[in-house]
Image: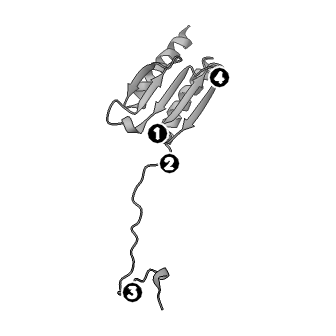
Amino acid sequence: MLGKADGYVGNGRANIVAFPGPHAPQQVGFDRAELTRILDLYGRMVAAGEWRDYAMDFTRDCAFFAAFRRTADVPQMRLEKRPALRHKQGMWALYGEQGQVLKRGHELAGVLALVERRLVKAVKS
């Protein structure tokens, strides 16, 4: 005999529970292609002697990548991915040492181009 614990309601119909729909992810992160591009730039900057350490932070709203000249310093560059701004000013933002916004954009390559130009100058000198 079926009871309420089995999903039987008594009038001949089953009690249907809706399947939970798509919900927001618990945290924002970098996908493989983005992380490959970021770490490739980091490796080239380390080889040029510009950076020595990095940090990543993942929150519900955004993901950060910060590069440091020395471990105990403030970040020389901070890259932020904020998907909520995807349709507005772009989900990528590059911040300088004092926290000023250096570049915003919809594409990671365009935002990182500013740092890559500095790498070309460092290698030439």
Q: Which mark is residue 13?
A: none
Q: How many marks?
A: 4
Q: Find numbered disc 3 in the image and state the secondary structure of the residue it sits on.
A: loop
Distance of label 3 from label 2 (alpha carbons): 39 Å
Q: Verify CB contact (< 8 Å) between mark 2 and mark 1.
A: no
Q: Find numbered disc 2 in the image and state the secondary structure of the residue it sits on.
A: loop
Distance of label 1 from label 4 (alpha carbons): 27 Å
Distance of label 4 from label 3 (alpha carbons): 69 Å
Q: Residue furthest top?
A: 125
Q: Which mark is residue 10?
A: 3
Q: Earlier in the sequence, mark 4 or mark 2?
A: 2
Dot 4 crowding, Cα within 10 Å, few <14, some 14–19, many 20+: some
Distance of label 4 from label 2 (alpha carbons): 30 Å
Dot 3 crowding, Cα within 10 Å, few <14, some 14–19, many 20+: few
Q: Earlier in the sequence, mark 3 or mark 2?
A: 3
Q: Position of residue 100 (x, y in %)?
A: 46, 18
What amino acid type should be assigned to the residue bearing mark 1?
Asp
Q: Find numbered disc 4 in the image and state the secondary structure of the residue it sits on.
A: loop
Q: Nearer the viewer, residue 77 or 40?
A: 77
What amino acid type should be assigned to the residue bearing mark 3?
Gly
Q: Residue furthest left?
A: 87
Q: Verify CB contact (< 8 Å) between mark 4 and mark 3.
A: no
Q: Earlier in the sequence, mark 1 or mark 3?
A: 3
- Asked if residue 22 lies left or right of residue 115, the reply is left
| Residue named by callout 2 | 26
What amino acid type should be assigned to the residue bearing mark 2?
Gln
Q: Nearer the viewer, residue 42 or 88?
A: 88
Distance of label 2 from label 1 (alpha carbons): 9 Å
> Which-is-in-front pick, marks 1 and 3?
3
